[in-house]
Image (spheres, coloured by chain):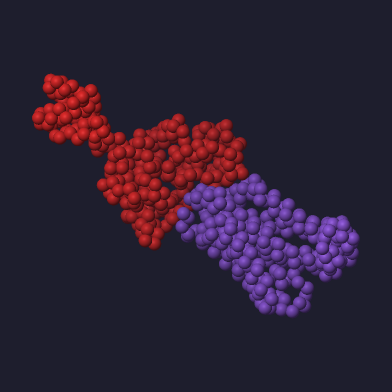
Chain colours: A red, B purple
């Protein structure tokens, strides 16, 4: 549904995006992850024909994207960065403009999307008087008003409160699962994306550094056994004497990344108790997604 | 046509809610009011003294009659019109960048060319409305203060010239649209209009006014027979070509330029 071939954008010497190859399948929610300035928005702008690639191509529904491909844009809903509206027009009027520019004959489309995004209380409020969260909802309404086949969303949950984030997440999951909508969504928060994306691409310094199925994230995240005991030195010696790898002490906690110990923490407990050095803390700690994300980036050049 | 009508309706919706629209209307009513006041002062110097106006005795309109008053109106539309229509154009195009709504209207089923053309359509209507306001207000105020020397001949001569100058001035708005798009805002196009206005004064001084697009409406507004101020057929062609280049330049810019 969405495909890029060596998609690149350079501004003089700055390589904003370099040879990105993506392939997003129908009904998939593709999380496009990267730090600020990683090249996410530039990639999205190229997918929408807003900027021309320096080299490479973008295809949506097997059609090459270009600025004047108006037929293709009928099938795409999008939101790029912070959504802006005409400040002196109301929510309803702003949506009416989009309805007309999208040639939607059903006049109820505006009311329907207002209801769907819970903007009814603000329908007659001028856009300039909306809170950031409601302005974001209005931006999402622009993207969804025509029930698109493809949704391209750049940081769509910016400014939303936790309930709003949950609601949008549920809505996108429903669209993908039940209506076959393909969602391409960018974010800099892995924890948020991983909750509903089916596949995740990590972009760093303009390059795609990793592409993973979301359900394999657990396997890739590092696990450690955390141990605290009254006599940490004795505990370390006991662990070593029993054939486990050397635990590393950090901030008063021993970190043991021995696979056997992680899979059988009760063995460690038994050994320590029997040796008269019972643990006061024993916990299998899984690396959180943010930490995994940052580790992945650091392996690919670090944060600049 | 479907593209154009959809884009045009949305431009009307934006205009209707725009404060700037109403501000320009008030401004274009204010100008003939001021002209009327000056004419009144010219006719009755004692009023000028009461109001504390300096130079009340000066002959502001050449002759203090309809001919002088209407000629002043022509000169006004050639200069204030250039600024006013330039501002209108800067606003219609530049606001998409100032309000950051440009991204919302570029990847849609309606073509970018239709959006640009609709914007030019709304600019033409807006400017024509301002022309009509200044025209009607000017005539009404002139009658109200009882300017002497009204005749159908004087009126017809003025009306023809006034409409011609207004038309040429409106045509010169299209390059402003290009500058607004290129400069992504309204500062650059307004600066461009001011620079063109200043340049047209210098160009007219050296006698090249009839060949410089932005000086041509001004040249038309001065009395016939003024040295170095004779409009030639080429003058109209120059304005037309400038307008066409501005129009298509803007369309091409919208179609091909990166919209960051």
Asked if one can make out residue B151 in the rendered structure from this viewpoint, the answer is: no
Residue B188: x and y in percent read 57, 60
Q: Front-most of A158 and A47?
A: A158
Taking the spot 39% from the left edge, 49% from the top edge, the residue there is A37
Q: Tell me, yes or no, if residue A204 can be seen here.
A: yes
Lateral position of residue B87 relative to residue A190, left or right:
right
Residue B94 position (above or below residue A30): below
Q: Is residue A209 left or right of residue A150?
A: left
Residue B30 place in picture, x, y as percent: 76, 55
Q: Name which quarter of the figure residue B32 lies in.
A: bottom right
Q: Is residue A125 left or right of residue A295?
A: right
- Rendered view: B248 above or below B207: above
Q: Residue B222's x, y, as percent?
A: 76, 72
Depth check, front residue: B102 or A115? B102
**Residue beneath the point at 67% across and 51% down:** B21
Residue under the point 65% across and 74% down:
B203
How many marks do you count on the picture?
A: 0
């Amino acid at each position: 549904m969405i495909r890029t071939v060596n998609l690149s954008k350079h501004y003089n010497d700055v390589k904003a995006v370099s040879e990105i190859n993506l392939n997003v399948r129908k009904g998939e929610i593709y999380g496009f992850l990267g730090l600020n300035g990683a090249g996410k928005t530039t990639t999205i702008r190229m997918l929408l024909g807003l900027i021309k690639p320096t080299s490479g191509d973008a295809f949506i529904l097997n059609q090459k994207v270009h600025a004047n491909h108006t037929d293709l844009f009928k099938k795409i809903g999008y939101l790029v960065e912070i959504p802006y509206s005409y400040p002196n027009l109301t929510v309803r009027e702003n949506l009416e403009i989009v309805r007309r520019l999208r040639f939607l004959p059903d006049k109820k489309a505006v009311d329907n999307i207002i209801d769907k995004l819970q903007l009814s209380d603000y329908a007659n409020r001028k856009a300039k008087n909306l809170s950031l969260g409601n302005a974001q909802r209005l931006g999402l309404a622009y993207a969804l008003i025509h029930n698109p086949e493809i949704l391209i969303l750049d940081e769509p949950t910016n400014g939303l409160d936790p309930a709003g984030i949950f609601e949008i997440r549920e809505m996108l999951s429903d669209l993908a699962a039940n209506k076959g909508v393909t969602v391409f969504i960018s974010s800099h928060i892995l924890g948020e994306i991983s909750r509903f994306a089916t596949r995740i691409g990590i972009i760093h310094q303009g390059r795609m550094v990793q592409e993973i199925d979301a359900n394999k994230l657990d396997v890739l995240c590092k696990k450690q056994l955390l141990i605290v005991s009254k006599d940490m030195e004795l505990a370390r010696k006991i662990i070593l004497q029993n054939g486990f790898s050397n635990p590393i002490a950090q901030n008063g906690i021993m970190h043991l990344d021995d696979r056997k110990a992680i899979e059988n923490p009760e063995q460690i407990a038994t050994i320590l108790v029997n040796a008269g050095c019972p643990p006061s803390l024993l916990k299998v700690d899984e690396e959180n997604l943010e930490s995994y994300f940052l580790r992945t980036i650091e392996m690919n050049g670090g944060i600049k | 046509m479907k593209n154009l009508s959809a884009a045009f309706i949305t431009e009307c919706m934006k205009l209707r809610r725009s404060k700037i629209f109403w501000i320009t209307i008030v401004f274009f009513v204010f100008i003939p009011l001021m002209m009327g006041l000056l004419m009144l002062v010219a006719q009755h110097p004692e009023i000028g003294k009461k109001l504390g106006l300096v130079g009340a005795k000066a002959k502001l309109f050449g002759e203090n009659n309809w001919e002088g008053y209407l000629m002043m109106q022509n000169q006004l539309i050639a200069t204030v019109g250039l600024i006013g229509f330039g501002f209108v154009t800067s606003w219609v195009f530049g606001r998409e960048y100032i309000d950051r709504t440009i991204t919302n209207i570029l990847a849609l089923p309606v073509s970018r060319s239709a959006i640009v053309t609709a914007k030019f359509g709304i600019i033409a209507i807006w400017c024509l409305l301002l022309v009509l306001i200044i025209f009607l207000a000017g005539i009404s105020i002139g009658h109200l203060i009882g300017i002497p020397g009204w005749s159908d001949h004087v009126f017809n001569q003025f009306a023809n010239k006034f409409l011609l100058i207004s038309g040429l001035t409106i045509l010169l708005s299209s390059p402003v649209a290009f500058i607004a798009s290129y400069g992504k805002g309204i500062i650059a196009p307004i600066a461009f209009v001011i620079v063109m206005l200043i340049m047209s004064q210098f160009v007219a001084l050296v006698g090249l006014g009839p060949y410089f697009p932005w000086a041509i409406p001004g040249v038309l507004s001065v009395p016939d027979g003024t040295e170095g101020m004779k409009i030639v057929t080429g003058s109209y062609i120059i304005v037309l070509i400038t307008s066409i280049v501005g129009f298509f330049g803007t369309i091409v810019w919208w179609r091909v330029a990166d919209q960051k």
